[in-house]
Image (cartoon, rainbow, N blue to C red):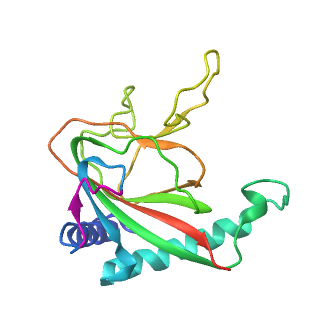
Amino acid sequence: MCGCVIGSFNEELAGDVRNHRSLIWEPYDRVTRGGSVTKDLLETPTEAIGSLERALRTVIDEFKTSLAADGDHPFFGTAPAAYRLTLIASILKPGGHHPSHIHEGAWLSGVYYAAVPAAITGDDDSHAGWLQFGKPDCQVPVGCALQTAAVAPDAGTVVMFPSYFFHHTIPYRGCEERIGIAFDVYRVQ
């Protein structure tokens, strides 16, 4: 897709998030620090939110069909035939972040980046503003080596991962907002 089309779409989506009636600063039921979060965007979808939902469902469905069949694996062996999708947006201000957490009850989680500040770059050794995996929200026994990975956000991209992966965002500096739309895939019985 043309960069100008993605740019226009992301601007519309970011505007819908900024103006969403459920947007609240550091809600008590979310892990966001230094930012605002919405309730499920699919409860009152705009045209752009509906377009994002359709695109995400296509990506999720294609991903599910690509998985290796392994009934003993906690992720590959539990892909739901039918699912419910939720979309929760966050707007982080400079210095804001999401502390380490998991998405309990979901099978697959991810984030779509609608706006990424120019201060967040893919070549930053400090990984400021990046999404990092592998650091739990509790003490790790002495001598236990953690395997971590970090992903630089990029406007217009999707990052997906098993919902049981601990993840957090690393604070960044600058003057622009970082707008991400987290999504969760829940099994429908």
In which quadrant of the rendered view does residue 145 lie?
top right
Looking at the rendering, in which quadrant would you find the C terminus? bottom right
Q: Tell me which residue sits at (33%, 63%) in the image.
A: 89
**Residue 117 percent across, percent down from the top left:** 24, 47
Q: Is residue 100 left or right of residue 118?
A: right
Classify 67 as above or below 96. Answer: below
Looking at the rendering, in which quadrant would you find the N terminus? bottom left
Q: Which residue lies furthest to the front in this view?
A: 28
Q: Which residue lies furthest to the left in this view?
A: 175
Magenta span of residues: 22-29
**Residue 161 percent across, percent down from the top left:** 58, 53
Q: Is residue 75 left or right of residue 89?
A: right
In which quadrant of the rendered view does residue 10 lie?
bottom left
Q: In this view, does 89 lie to the left or right of 72?
A: left
- What is the chief secondary structure element of the magenta stretch? loop
Q: Tell me which residue sits at (64%, 15%) in the image.
A: 143
Classify 27 as above or below 142. Answer: below
Q: In this view, does 101 lie to the left or right of 161?
A: left
The answer to if 26 sits in the magenta stretch is yes
**Residue 132 percent across, percent down from the top left:** 47, 39
Residue nearest the observer in this picture, 132 or 174: 132
Q: Tell me which residue sits at (19%, 66%) in the image.
A: 18
The answer to if 58 sits in the magenta stretch is no
Q: Tell me which residue sits at (51%, 74%) in the image.
A: 85
